[in-house]
Amino acid sequence: MRRLTRALRPMAAAALLCALATGCWQADMPETEALTPIPSDAGLLETAEPQVILPEIFSLPYAPGQSLDPVSCPDGMQQTVSSLICEGLFRLNTDLEPEPWLCGSYTYDPAAWVYTFTLREGVTFSDGSPLTGADVKATLDRARTSDRYRQRLAQVTSVSASGNTVTVSLSGPNTGFPALLDIPIVKSGTQDTVPMGTGPYLFTTADSAAYLVSNQSWWRGGGQPVDRILLSEAADRDTMLYRFTSHDVQLITADLTGTDPIAATGNVSFQDADTTTLQYIGCNVTRAPLDNAAFRSALWNGFSRTQIVSAFLSGHARPAQFPVSPCTSLYPTALEEPYSADGFAAALAASGVSAGRTLTLLVNQENSFKVSVAEHLAETFTDAGIPMTVQALPWAEYTAALAAGNFDLYYGEVRLGADWDLSPLLSTGGSLNYGGWADPQTDQLLAAYAAAADRTAAMEALCAHLRTQAPVIPVCFKSTSVLMQTDVVEGLTPTMAQPFYNLTECTIRLQADGT
């Protein structure tokens, strides 16, 4: 866990709590609004660390006028609360790979593209009623039409249930489909405002206050770090931030490289979690010289991704040469090539492309982090003999330019599915394929990966081809962060979708503990 104490690091504090209005604990985004840079630690004022004052009760923010239904509730604080109430058939671990949770076992028919999931035995909702296939079907049916999960479940053609089994039919092969089923399951008929789930806590009210209290029938048999969590009212982001900085609440989630940075002070620590959010350079392959594969391939390794993550994203990302997260077992580490200025110059010379017109790199202007990265890339390429300028556009103009193909290059971002289906970005006619890439071999490799029993080998084959063709140039995978009052929560390991992923292994310290 990393601390931001020292008077909350004056420069870092200015960008500490950001993009909370838009985001981002488990939002399924297509090409989304940019993620904006926490400045470096240069020039920090060293002061004595503030005294830690433990709370009497652990508290989380929540908006009482908004639903806690995980299918429809707003991103951010409502999802954090909801994640303690409801659980999914699977959950993504720290390597962004699925582990069975409410699902006890499953089978896949690759000929019919049908999954059959058998529920874990002995699981009940917090009212003691058993989890059934009908409850799972009801949640998945709602999710298929929801803003949050519609795109994720677009391949699902039908869901049926019988007893403790659920059958899901797909429109095509997908051997990674279980990774998409971390969708929290709600008991049928309880989703309106406060859902009933199978998770470690349940929602209750007492003395005009809202609480989460330990679910005594939790199928894991206990281990919650506290018996009761106060839900402090925070109707909007500003109220939530005030409650956090004043330590009325002890934990929030944030995108620390998002837009609209907000100042915060206090004794605060943060813990990052890997996400499936890819930042990349998109190429318009219909325009010279970007219609030259050797030229695009030279650009692929023409900059230091490590430097970008360190200098412009303050470490809140993982450098990536391929469009799959390096934290996963699918990432083809053996294909990586170290950055070298000399190697870049040699690759440019071998491409046969000489300095010509000035290329334009589009970027979303609302996000200063992404603008800074784009400016660094343009400067790097210009210094190497490829004249390039940055055009920062408002979000509406930026997306319109992409849709019209009115660009040379663009700095983009997309939240990929945890099944690592790259077809929206790279297939012929893909919904996010703004650069006009149409390549039968890429389409074949995408299809082979979707149907592969050996997904690691299939991803490696796909990435090897992408490395030579470079229709998009990966830069990094972003992190999301849990911010905590220092020394109150210890041993917490968050994941992209679950701030309290290792709930039973963490410790929450209160005044009553006598420490």
Image (cartoon, helix red, strand yellow):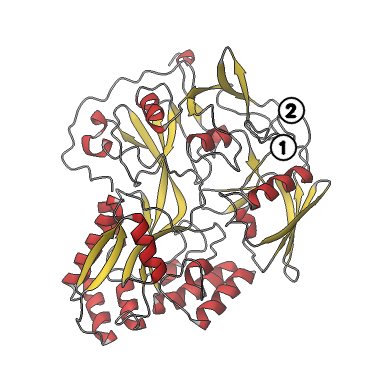
Q: Are marks 2 and 1 in contact (CB under 8 Å)?
A: yes
* Residue that mark 2 sits on: 127
409 or 385: nearer the viewer: 409
Residue positioned most to the bottom: 352
Circle nearer the viewer, 2 or 1: 1
Left/right of residue 287 with respect to residue 42 in the rendered view: right
Give coordinates of residue 333: x percent, y percent: 43, 66
* Quarter-of-image position of residue 322: bottom left
Residue 321 at least partly seen: no
**Percent coordinates x, y for residue 178 in the rendering:** 64, 56
Q: Nearer the viewer, residue 265 or 137?
A: 137
Answer with the quarter of the image where residue 473 lies.
bottom left
User: Number of marks in the image?
Assistant: 2
Query: Height in image: 214 above or below 478?
Result: above
Other-residue count near label 2 (Cα within 10 Å), few / some / many at <14 / 14–19 / ≥20: some
Name the residue nearer the viewer: 264 or 507: 264
Q: Assign the C terminus to one quadrant of the image.
A: top left
Dot 2 amino acid type: Asp
Q: Earlier in the sequence, mark 2 or mark 1?
A: 2
Residue at 54% across, 58% down: 417
236 over 98 or under it: above or below: above
Q: Report the residue at 48% width, 57% height from top.
A: 30
Q: For the residue labelled by badge 1, is the local secondary structure a helix, a strand or a loop?
A: loop
Secondary structure under tag 2 reads loop
Question: Which kind of residue does numbered mark 1 sit on?
Answer: Lys
Crowding around mark 1 (Cα neighbors within 10 Å: few <14, some 14 to 19, many 20+) is: many
Q: CA distance from mark 2 to mark 1?
A: 10 Å
> In the image, residue 66 lies at what x, y percent?
54, 32
Q: Residue 14, how many percent across, how many down? A: 26, 37
Q: Is residue 299 left or right of residue 79?
A: left
Question: Can you identify the residue that label 1 sits on?
Answer: 187
